Image (cartoon, helix red, strand yellow):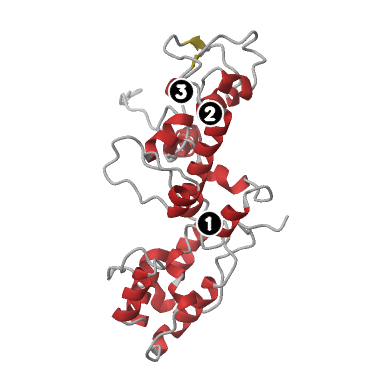
Amino acid sequence: MLGVVDFKVIDIDPTEIAKSLQNFVSRGSKLTGVSLDDINLGVLSMPADPKKVLLSDLLSAGMKLFDAMVWLTAGRPTSHPLVVDLSLTAATVPSMHSIARSVFYVYFFLLTQARYPAVRNEASPPKVANFLTQILGMTRPQYEYVEEICSFTPQKFDPAWVRNVQFQNLGQETLSRFGLGVAGYRLFGPFKTHRPTKDVPAELKNAYEFACLLSKSSATWDIHPVTRNPSVLTKRGNLNKNLGNLILEIFSNEQIDEMVACKILFKKPEKEPNYRDYLTWESSDDISGSSMIFRST
């Protein structure tokens, strides 16, 4: 009676559509990832054989380290060939030693602050550790160290590379400095250096014992913000916000002022009423894992 009715509507199969969109969702969810269009392909002079050129050759020709790594990782693509940059001169090409110092500067920031140094014209650049300025003499603006090795926004260059740097050949001064703490552990510090001046309330004893335990434990990549295991948030909530609240409840104002003065704390924590996970924390360590930052081998 009706015949064939064409409603001019296409119904999708959710399962098949999800399969098709998975890669797009995954890619779109990430902050990291460098496009070949992001890098500077200029060199001082064209290599004899671009198809066989090595990283050291590209650096000697004036290409920036991170740019060169992206281009080599892409397989020396002919779609994005090297080009001679007439603005480059031998005098402006940084030495390998200068590049090494810039790489270490960036590495130090990632390990101790879990972020890249500030780029040019950044509104609120982070503080630079005295170790970099006073001990190693790295007093230039932060952005200069970044721009010496990278022509694109450094956040696109996955910072997880810090996890695979070996410590064996690092300078003793550097190893000693890293021993003072890495990113992710700053707010555990007070629980290692101070004892409450009053009895810890019963409802906070587990949280206090947990914080004391972590303050003395070896640093792990599961807790470091650059490589943090997602289960940390699930099990303990936002560590910094909760630890800040716990510090305010456990220690006196005089103690906290002393922590700030001694640089155990960067500043006095602010009360965060929405972060109350610490009230349910268990005293055992279920978040550190076994991926030690300071490996013995």
| Image quarter hosting the C terminus | bottom right
Alpha carbon separation for disc pair 2 and 3: 10 Å
Q: Is label 2 in contact with label 3 (beta carbons under 8 Å)?
A: no
Which residue is rendered at x = 32% and y = 65% of the image? 267
* Residue linked to disc 1: 229
Kindly indicate the quadrant of the structure image that contains residue 260: bottom left
Alpha carbon separation for disc pair 1 and 3: 31 Å
Number of the front mark, 2 or 3: 2
Q: Nearer the viewer, residue 256 or 161?
A: 256
Tag 3 or tag 1, which sits nearer the N-term?
3
Tag 1 or tag 2, which sits nearer the N-term?
2
The reply, left or right, for residue 103 in relation to residue 151 is: right
Alpha carbon separation for disc pair 2 and 1: 29 Å
Q: What kind of element bears circle 3?
A: loop
Q: Amino acid at mark 1?
A: Asn
Number of the front mark, 2 or 1: 2
Q: Is residue 46 above or below residue 243?
A: above
* Residue linked to disc 3: 39
Q: Nearer the viewer, residue 135 or 157?
A: 135
Which residue is rendered at x = 50% and y = 77% of the image? 212
Q: Residues within 10 Å of mark 2 (few under 14, many from 20)?
A: many
Kindly indicate the quadrant of the structure image that contains residue 207: bottom left
Number of the front mark, 1 or 3: 3
The reply, left or right, for residue 200 in relation to residue 108 is: left
Which residue is rendered at x = 50% and y = 81% of the image? 209
* Residue linked to disc 2: 65
Query: Quick one: which residue is furthest to the bottom in this view?
Result: 199
Which residue is rendered at x = 58% and y = 54% of the image? 173
Q: What kind of element bears circle 1?
A: loop
Q: Is residue 122 above or below residue 130?
A: above
Q: Is residue 126 above or below residue 196?
A: above
